[in-house]
Amino acid sequence: MSNDSISAKNATADAAGVAADASPTGEPRSEAAVSPDASLLTSGSEGGIGGFFRRIVKVQSFQILLVLLAIFVVFSALAPDTFPTWSNMRLVIQNVSILAVLGIGMTYVIITSGIDLSIGSVLVFSGVIAAKVMQGMGGDGWGTAIVGILVSIVCGVLWGIFNGLLIAKAKVPPLIVTLGTLSGALGLAQVITGGVDIREVPAVLASNIGYGNIPGTTIPTISVIALVLLLILGVVLHKTKFGLYTYAVGSNEESARRVGVKVDRHLIFVYALSGLMAGMAGILSLAQYSTTAIAGQSTTSLAVIAAVVIGGTSLFGGVGTIFGTIVGLFIPAILQNGFVITGVQPFWQQVAIGAVLIVAVYIDQRRRAAASRATKTGKRSLAHLFRR
């Protein structure tokens, strides 16, 4: 067996062992260092197809998917000639794409028990710098566009690294750090532009990415880009050592550190990833709207956080899936679209999203409480066994 295989197995075993360590005293945690969705699906406590489906029903992301399907069915019944059509669904998918890119980074961050309030402002800042550079270069070709794409990504990554360093090395709480960078990034963007949006965007960005389709289809290019990123980062989260360490750090940072996970470095990488996704979203926003849209991103961060939490990612860390985030993103998008089509006041959308968010957090709390009770029961049973 190769050294790489041995080290990968050891790393997996070490990170999985974090689940058994809840504190420096060695008390077991109620949460696992891997997604509970995966553990439910692979559990062997119930056999056969019936047992498999019973386990699926317990998965929170599946429960949220059922909510999404129910909402879809209701609006389809209310507006059968308009709502369920491909042209309408295409619009919904296109509108969700940028939030989906931001949701990837936010999922990683929240799984580590962190938060990133700055992604909307970093999106704006990255887009502004990219637009300024492309404006200075002139031209509407791919050469100018590619430079702008790279500049936007680099800006996002640098903001992410800055956040990560303050959180991991200076030990400033993520809420405070990202609240500060939210204000700082947005303020710098407004200083650079004088508060006036830049509207000179290379035509190839808008026509090919912003509102273009995959050749020969009516599938939005921007949505395919988002889907590719979701698939790649989903595999990284669920199938690689980096993803396993992300769950481990969120499950219990101190225990992860004790088994050899370089927690500080990992947190910096996670926030850099969030910044990278914000940079990507910045250039996609430029492409879609053909402007920097500074004022249009004021609630972006909160919308993404809400979607990630609705999708089953725990604010307490250690739990979450990319699939759940996708489902969580579509619930507010479908609600908004359905309300508009059926003539319901759009204000009700916020009420509905708030209700779904509260229910999602309540389910997470119940799940954590049940896991805690199960852990205590197991400890009592083990103690009784040894007394015998």
Image: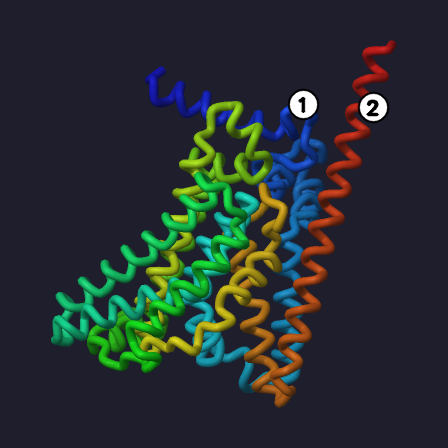
Counting from the top left corner in percent of width and height, residue 204 is at 20, 74
Question: Toward the viewer: 123 or 370?
Answer: 123
Q: Quadrant of the N terminus?
A: top left
Residue furthest to the bottom in view is 343
Q: How is the image coloured?
A: rainbow
- Corner quadrant of residue 344: bottom right
Counting from the top left corner in percent of width and height, residue 244 is at 49, 35
Counting from the top left corner in percent of width and height, residue 121 is at 42, 66
Residue 118 lies left or right of residue 315; in this view the side is left
Question: Toward the viewer: 59 or 244?
Answer: 244
Counting from the top left corner in percent of width and height, residue 6 is at 40, 19
Which residue is labeled 1 in the image?
Answer: 25
Please name the residue shown 12% across and 75% down the image.
139
Residue 227 lies left or right of residue 384; in this view the side is left
In this picture, is 253 found above or below 128?
above
- Corner quadrant of residue 141: bottom left
Q: Quadrant of the C terminus?
A: top right
Question: Toward the viewer: 286 or 156?
Answer: 156
Amino acid type for the residue under numbered disc 2: Arg
**Residue 339 in view, yes or no:** yes
Q: N-terminal of the two: label 1 or label 2?
A: 1
Please name the residue shown 70% across and 40% down the image.
51
The circle drawn on residue 269 is: none
| Label 1, residues with CA under 10 Å away: few <14, some 14-19, many ≥20 | few
| Label 2, residues with CA under 10 Å away: few <14, some 14-19, many ≥20 | few
- Secondary structure beneath label 2: helix
Amino acid type for the residue under numbered disc 1: Thr
Q: CA distance from mark 1 to mark 2?
A: 18 Å
- Secondary structure beneath label 1: loop
Which residue is labeled 2 in the image?
Answer: 380
**Residue 232 in view, yes or no:** no
Please name the residue shown 43% across and 38% down the image.
266
